Image (cartoon, rainbow, N blue to C red):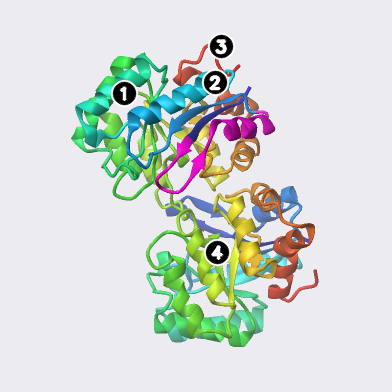
Amino acid sequence: MIIDMHMHIDDIPALGWKMSAAQCIERMDEAGVDAAAVMTIADLPGINPKALELIAEACGQYPGRLYGFIRLHPWYREQSLELLDRAVNESGFKGLKLHPVSSLAHPSGEDTIALIRRAGALGIPTLFHCGDEPMTTPLSIEPAAAACPDSVIILGHMGGYFHVDEAIEVAERHPNIVLETSATPYPAKIREAVERIGAERVIFGSDGPVSSPVLERDKVMIAGLTPEATDLVLGHNAAKLLGVTA
Amino acid sequence: MTIDGLAYLGTSRFGYELDAEALVKGLERERISGAIAAPMHRVDHDFDRANEHVAQAAAGSGGRLVPMARVDPWDGDQALRQLNRAVVELGARGLFLHPAEEYFRINDARVQPLARRAAELGIPIVVATGYQGFSEPVQITQFARACPEVPVILTNGGQFNISGLSQTDAGLALNLDNVYVHTSGVYRDDWIALVVSTFGAERILFASAAPIMDVRYELKRVELAHVPDEAKALMLSGNATRLFGLGGELA
């Protein structure tokens, strides 16, 4: 089973991002991906007031294939906590997405910590955009991982272009951190991550549909993992995090 | 035929290395005809020796490697002499500039003499792109605008941000007719398709950026791109052949 833990559905003309559920499914089929975690690219509330409904509707359209992650803005603390509860308890969302570039909310800020802890209490992981911009680097996210040991924190892009070594180091220090492989261009670093933190803590993502799930899947294959580790990275770990049968 | 538009050779003071034998083996494994090879920034900062090393590697590669010169603009007239020598005596087919590793701003006026010399020598300039403060796509736009007769090739699709935040700026650079981009590290395949459909397939080239990036993976990036076959042919070899003036080399 292959599960893509990082796909997007949204329509934000200003960023050149327009992605539908049908596009995600098409690209998943192209890559033999069975299921995917889907999220918007702008935050709820604030500039994306219909985000919960948009993702819930997409997941409803493709049951068993798309699983929702709710992307929230930490500054709207009480409202966001309420939306998180609602998304998980009423709409079956499986994860929380945080993107400090769009929210300008630091990962270690109190509002963010409150959301991560609530996600942990609800039994869902928190996926951070983790790249090269200020507030998104592994070392910026590390204090949040330390403050929320009972919450699983996924470092999306595992440090991007320039912070991959730091992502692996931070994951070595915090067992609640999982590395997600999308967009970063270094197959060898996926292998290194598996060797250093274990295959159980590395998961496949594509950042599709504008990135290619086929190419991103092949990156994991090129990494040269054992067949067992490949299975874990491509799907089994994600199935566990999503609470679905692999 | 497939040509890798950029690979680095030597031992870098920044912690990476690749020798000609390993590079050629990697190319053969992926059925790549050859590569345009640029020197790394040596520990001793001796770009004359670095250029010689790559020229020698190319000469001994059985036609697999074509050398590119690398100089440091802070070296002033010496950099101009090194560029001349690399092209005229050592057979370099392009100039490689790495603003982040040599610590200069690409749009600093002091870089322009090198651009003018590249124009006189009839060679393109490849710029390691996307390093904040050194080679942002809009900074390279300013640089390229000042030397319209020189093809300026931006690595990494013209931007190096995992959120694609500089993609629009890379598009602004591509509005100039003398700007081209490499495919290395471009994580959005819709960007590759967009460059082809908006600016033309002759504006984008396959490059692996080995050993920093992975030859096999970077080649797949192009092979899987959602662009017409004719566009892919240009990306994989046609554009490099034209821009670097390759005749029978790498065939």
Camera sees residue A95: yes
Q: Which residue is mark 3?
A: B248
Q: Amino acid at mark 3?
A: Gly
Q: Secondary structure at mark 4?
A: strand
In the rendered view, would you say A35 is above or below B156? below
- In this view, the mark in front (4 or 3): 3
Residue A44, image x, y percentages: 48, 72
Q: Are marks 1 and 2 in contact (CB under 8 Å)?
A: no
Depth check: B37 or B195 in front?
B37
What residue range appears in magenta? Answer: B9-31
Residue that label 2 marks: B60
Three-letter amino acid code at disc 2? Gly
CA gap, disc 4 to disc 3? 45 Å
Contact (CB < 8 A) between labels 4 and 2? no
Residue at 23%, 33% (x, y): give it.
B75
Q: Earlier in the sequence, mark 3 or mark 1?
A: 1
What chain does badge 3 belong to? B
Find disc 1 in the rendering and name its residue. Answer: B83
Horizontal side of residue B38 vs A59, given as left or right:
left
The residue tagged 4 is A156
